[in-house]
Amino acid sequence: MASERAAGGFGSRLALFGVYTSVPLAVIAFYWLRQVGLLAPTPYWIVVSLLVGTSVANLAANVWLARDPQSLVRMHGRVAVSALSTAAVLHTTGWGSILAIGYALGAAELLGVAGARSWRPAVVWNTAAIVLGEIALWMGLAPTLLEPRLAHFASAMGVLCLVLVSRILGTTAEAAERAELEVREREEHFRELVQYATDVIAVIDEGGTVRYVSPAIKGLLGYEPSECVDRPVARLLNRETAARVVDLFASASTTPGRPVLFDANFVHRSGEERIVEMTVTGKLNATGPGIVANLHDVTEQRLLEAQLIWDAGHDALTGLWNRAALTTNLAQACERAGRDGSRIALLFVDLDGFKLVNDTLGHEVGDAALIETAYRLRAAVRSCDTVARLGGDEFTILLDQIDDESQVLEVADRVVAAFDAPWLQLGEHLRLTGSVGIAFAGATHTSAEELLRLADAAMYEAKRSGRSCWARSAAI
């Protein structure tokens, strides 16, 4: 408000200065024109009085309108004062009828100041001023340098030009104002969308510096927009993805209009990492190359997807691979072995006496025994070997890329020995052992189903041999 009052005060002082300077200049001009015979012989005191009076009246009308620019009454008052003042001065000089077309120039100037809504009041009051001037001329109250009939004709032509010019300028101004209003409304709508959008919108230059970021960055990463602008976007990313993302920004800035979608790991102000899906589109305009980025938080979604993928391939109780994952990986291993002549082995492990544990100690102890079994099997095999639970008390171990059978037999010995340690959760009088069946696949192609069947058959052979031992099928 203070700034508006200051601006208004400056405008009033400027207008007052215009009155002080324009009136003396106008008096000098009137005097010179009078001397060369180009003005009517109107007394000087009347001319000076009109110049001063009309200038003050116009100044007062301007100030009155400035206090409420939207008031239609004040608009009419401002136009009326301007038109009648102009008519009074022009008809005093004898040029009123000749210069009637000049009212169109005044109407055009008013359009630039007051906008399109002023053109109709300008036509009404300027026409009224011309008509009143012609009535004064007809009644002999105003002088004229033309023969009266010719003066009236000139005034009529002036009114016609005034209406045409005002109509054209007014229609053009109205169309321009409507277009400007639509642009402002669209800008405001865009600002509201950006202001309240949950996704983050950012403008980043080709060097990876943030030039604009929407307020949603506060919810995503905990930073205020002002803390991110004019700073490298890399400071918001974790170390592993920063270089890759900045390179993508630089590439996108050189290919405007082509969106690129990828995931990036951002670091929250608290230090927590957030997985963000980014859509970056290169732009190229007057401000130079760069990109527009849309950031959408997908942390929960990606974690859920990862969990679903994990659950789809792992046993819920032990965390080992499940039957579906084993089948897929075993099939791939068999195909690879048949293709490149490498050898693989599959160990089929079945717990001895597990039904007795469930029947006497309950399923809770039985589940604990299965978890312990998974732990012991993982500890007994190599890091490159894969342990899976088929279901119940049946487990498998896939040994890929083996050099010779002795490696497999060593693993089988460790697996059998793994069950020798006490099973504290089973009580003092119960223990579990494992029977292991071994099957091989090599140069001769063997399907996953066949290899699993052979290992299962070998496992039963181990049980028939006294349990707590391993048996092998014939090498293939």
Image (cartoon, helix red, strand yellow):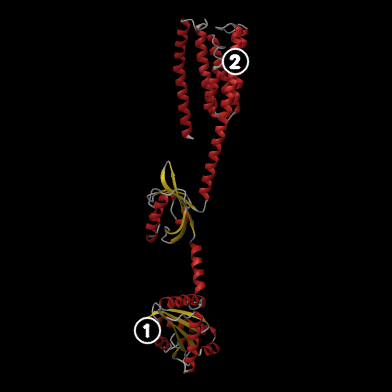
Tag 1 secondary structure:
loop
Q: Residue at horizontal 50%, vertical 14%?
A: 51
Which residue lies under the disc numbered 1?
A: 404
From the image, state whether disc 2 or disc 1 is nearer to you: 1
Residue nearer the viewer, 55 or 344: 344
Image vertical order of residue 85 relative to residue 242, above or below: above
- In whole angstroms, how far apart are the C-alphas of marks 2 and 1? 114 Å
Of the pair 378 and 337, the residue shown nearer to us: 337
The three-letter amino acid code for the residue at tag 2 is Met
Where does the image place residue 354, in percent across and percent down from the top left? 51, 88
> Is residue 335 among the parts visible in the rendering?
yes
What is the quadrant of the C terminus in the image? Answer: bottom left
Q: Residue at 47% across / 77% down in the picture?
A: 330
- The image shows residue 373 at horizontal and vertical percentages of 46, 83
Q: Secondary structure at mark 2?
A: helix
- Which of the two discs, 2 and 1, labels the residue nearer the N terminus? 2
The residue singled out by tag 2 in the image is: 157
